[in-house]
Image (cartoon, grey):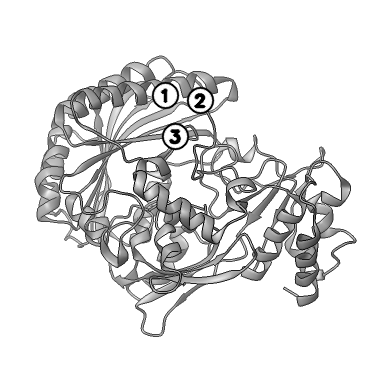
Amino acid sequence: MQSGVWWFLLALALSATGEASCTEKPMSDPNRLLRGKWVTSDRLNDISSGLKNNDGCFCSLAFWSQQQSQDTKPRCFFHPTDAEDVSAVILLSRATQCPFAVKGGGHAPFEGGSNSNGGITIDFDRMKHISLSDDMSSVAIGPGNTWVDVYRTLEKFNLTMAGGRTATVGVGGLTLGGGISFFSGQYGMTCDNIISYEIVLGSGEILIVDSKTNADLFWALRGGGGNFGVVTQFVAQTFEQGPMWGGTLAWEMVSSKGPLIDAMISYAEKGSNEDPKGALIQSFAYAQMQQMWISATMVHHSDPQSPGRHPEVFDDFLAIENAFRDTTRSTSHSNHTIEIDAANPIGLRQSYWGFTTYVDKQLAVEILDIFEEEVNQIKNFTGMVPALVYQIITVPQLKAMMSNGGNTLGINGGKRPLFLVQLTVMWMHKSDDEAVLTAMSNVLSRSQELARARGLHHPFLYMNYASQFQDPIASYGTENKARLIEVSKRYDPDGVFQNLNPGYFKLMGPPNQW
């Protein structure tokens, strides 16, 4: 950014009374400040762009959920090209007291998650650099990248990293919330593989953060979300990886759910310990067009296989007969993420809910029964795609999460495998929101009550699967939450990221109340 403009914005921020609102006075309208007569830099005019619609707001189609693309209307989009641009817009937000949101991949499901209603949406679509270190042991990644961007770049060198499993999910949101990968049994969460961060604080200061420099902030960023600043670069560990095996198997649920739950329990308690190179996503969903319940099993393994062969750790799954779909094969990491992405269409209404339990067969069966019962009340809504998803946080994964200083999540080093349970639902019409969200809330409360009664409840809530009515930070434990609050007070003493950046998960509670 040109130095004259940067210093102008700094002076503006320091002299502001803090009483203005971006929707109240002409001078405090961020679009006028960014594009109008007060800031005339050609570069700043260029990066504060958007498509103006008839009611004077700015819109973007680059969001996954309908709640973000249609329900949320920012005053403007700001397209930074480097950390200095981000610093300037944060100071501008402080000067005008105009709220902001930060968008990488735009994959947050709920309103305001990465798009600011009435405020500034900082869109990282011009910060998509990817550069390998000279020894190729690490990669520097801009926050505007999606995971398929990263993998396609690394695959040219027979490398990859422990990142997200869905092609178009953004690097930033997934990583700051923890991040599960196909390689988590070997390398832990995505956040456990970050070597350093470049971050812009609420003061506008730009810091490099690693395990030795600003070590308390380094720890907080490993699962603490966007509560401390805006990350403008991630440096991550790489490792050698060629083609890998995996794909999706699908059956009618009525005949397959029993054998699949048996196979899932065996994998959780034994198979994943013997072979940490595997990864499992087990889903049960209602297929509206076919008017039937289906079981969908995604299995992946970091070793390639010869045609017709599969890793022994998945024997029990591949032995189940009458699958009507089988895409398992050896192909690139990026291709596996593209396949998963195909099940996540853009433009529908979306909701996630999450919870965690200890692994138990009967509990898994009864949670599925609860899900089916509640979904039967809403399954005929237009566009309805509901799914109950079981994933295993394996013992090898829990051990790997202790690497490089550990993370904030509060489950590092656990001795028992966990069910990470996700409720995910897509639908078309806003008029159905209350019924859909009520059904998912009922599944959550009934399932957690059941788990508690059996002594199988676990408090952990994975941020990237939480609804806007849930509080993942509180689930990290009293000690970790207190430590995160102290880090926030040190690096964001004015509470910029608790007050002006309100849409996603904050330290003191969920974004919304149910």
Which of the marked residues, 1 or 3, is nearer the chain's N terminus? 1
- At label 3, which amino acid type do we have? Gln
Q: In terms of secondary structure, where does tag 1 sit?
A: helix
Q: In terms of secondary structure, where does tag 3 sit?
A: loop
Seen from the viewer's position, the closer of residues 115 and 17 is: 17
Q: What is the x, y in percent for residue 102?
A: 59, 53
Say which mark, if any, is on residue 441. Answer: 1
Identify residue for label 3: 470
Residue 238, located in which quarter of the rendered image?
bottom left
Position of residue 338 relative to residue 352, above or below, is below
Query: Would you say the residues marked 1 and 2 are in contact, meaning their CB atoms lie under 8 Å apart?
Result: yes
Q: What is the x, y in percent for residue 74?
A: 71, 44
Position of residue 492 relative to residue 344, above or below, is below
Query: Would you say the residues marked 1 and 3 are in contact, meaning their CB atoms lie under 8 Å apart?
Result: no
Seen from the viewer's position, the closer of residues 504 and 103 is: 504
Q: In terms of secondary structure, where does tag 2 sit?
A: loop
Which of the marked residues, 1 or 2, is nearer the chain's N terminus? 1
Can residue 265 be spotted in the picture? yes
Cα–Cα span, label 2 and label 3: 9 Å
Say which mark, if any, is on residue 514. Answer: 2
Residue farthest toward the right in the current orientation of the protein: 37
Which of the marked residues, 2 or 3, is nearer the chain's N terminus? 3
In the image, taking residue 43 as reference, residue 38 lies left or right, namely right
Cα–Cα span, label 1 and label 2: 9 Å
Can residue 168 be spotted in the picture? no
Q: What is the x, y in percent for residue 163?
A: 37, 59
Position of residue 90 relative to residue 366, above or below, is below
- Residue in view at x 12 percent, y 52 percent: 273
